[in-house]
Image (tube, helix red, strand yellow):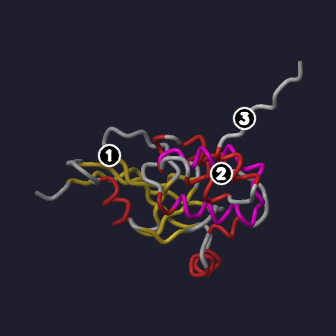
């Protein structure tokens, strides 16, 4: 009796056909970073990095499932600059290192996270999102940011806490009534 090959999923078929974005988009928005991390070995850098940049720009609350984001941003394949558009690449190239970054947190959130902002106001707005009455903003310096993105909440930089030097205590912020 011959053994049947395992069934391919729709995403695997699309990956095999070189339709990478379609394969990732089969997953819910929340699970797309995990799908990209899983399929990364099958996706060439020139397709992988633009997908990573697009997912970063559209992702909410990266801290809820940080493992795929760590896998994506720690990927050593060439072409990370392809995750950024032309304007972002120019702004990234012009950064004076180390750069000042800010992390907005609700009062009850852990300080770990990978989305830091280049603007204090953007971090404060993130900390006071939804129904939060108060939050905090961490201050840090990053010597080697991974990329830079212009987005909904301000200019964000994916990085890891171990790459950030926290040089000032967090400031508390309170939502105005």
Look at discs 3 and 2 and give the one toward the viewer: 3
| Mark 3 vs mark 2, CA separation in Å | 27 Å
Q: Quadrant of residue 54?
A: bottom right
Q: Which residue is mark 2?
A: 72
Q: Which residue is mark 3?
A: 7
Labels 2 and 1 touching (C-beta < 8 A):
no
SS category of the residue bearing label 1: strand
Crowd band around label 1 with a 10 angstrom C-alpha radius: few (<14), some (14–19), many (20+)? many
Which of the image's four quarters has the C terminus? Answer: bottom left
SS category of the residue bearing label 2: helix
- Residue 12: give x, y in percent of width and height: 70, 46
Which of the image's four quarters has the N terminus? Answer: top right
| Mark 2 vs mark 1, CA separation in Å | 25 Å
Of residues 30 and 13, the one nearer the viewer is: 13
- Residue 31: give x, y in percent of width and height: 52, 44
Looking at the rendered structure, the number of numbered marks drawn on it comes to 3
The majority secondary structure of the magenta stretch comes to helix
Q: Quadrant of residue 153?
A: bottom left
- What residue is rendered at 60% in x and 46% in y? 162
Question: Is 7 a magenta residue?
Answer: no
| Mark 3 vs mark 1, CA separation in Å | 44 Å
The range drawn in magenta is 30-56
Q: Is residue 25 left or right of residue 11?
A: left
Residue 106 numbered tag: 1
Going from the N terminus, do you reach mark 3 or mark 2 first? 3
Look at discs 3 and 1 and give the one toward the viewer: 3
């Amino acid at each position: 009796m011959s053994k049947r090959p395992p069934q391919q999923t729709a995403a695997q078929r699309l990956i095999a056909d070189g339709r990478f974005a379609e394969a990732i988009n089969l997953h819910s928005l929340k699970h797309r970073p995990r799908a990209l991390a899983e399929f990364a070995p099958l996706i060439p850098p020139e397709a992988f990095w633009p997908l990573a940049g697009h997912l970063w720009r559209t992702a909410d609350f990266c801290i809820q499932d940080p493992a795929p984001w760590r896998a994506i941003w720690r990927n050593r394949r060439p072409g990370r600059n392809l995750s950024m558009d032309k304007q972002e690449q120019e702004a990234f190239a012009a950064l004076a290192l180390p750069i000042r970054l800010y992390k907005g947190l609700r009062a009850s959130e852990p300080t770990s996270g990978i989305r830091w902002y280049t603007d204090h106001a953007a971090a404060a707005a993130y900390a006071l999102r939804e129904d939060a009455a108060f939050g905090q903003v961490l201050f840090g310096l990053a010597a080697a940011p991974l990329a830079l993105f212009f987005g909904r909440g301000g200019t964000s930089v994916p990085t890891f806490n171990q790459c950030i030097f926290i040089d000032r205590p967090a400031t508390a912020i309170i939502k105005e009534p």
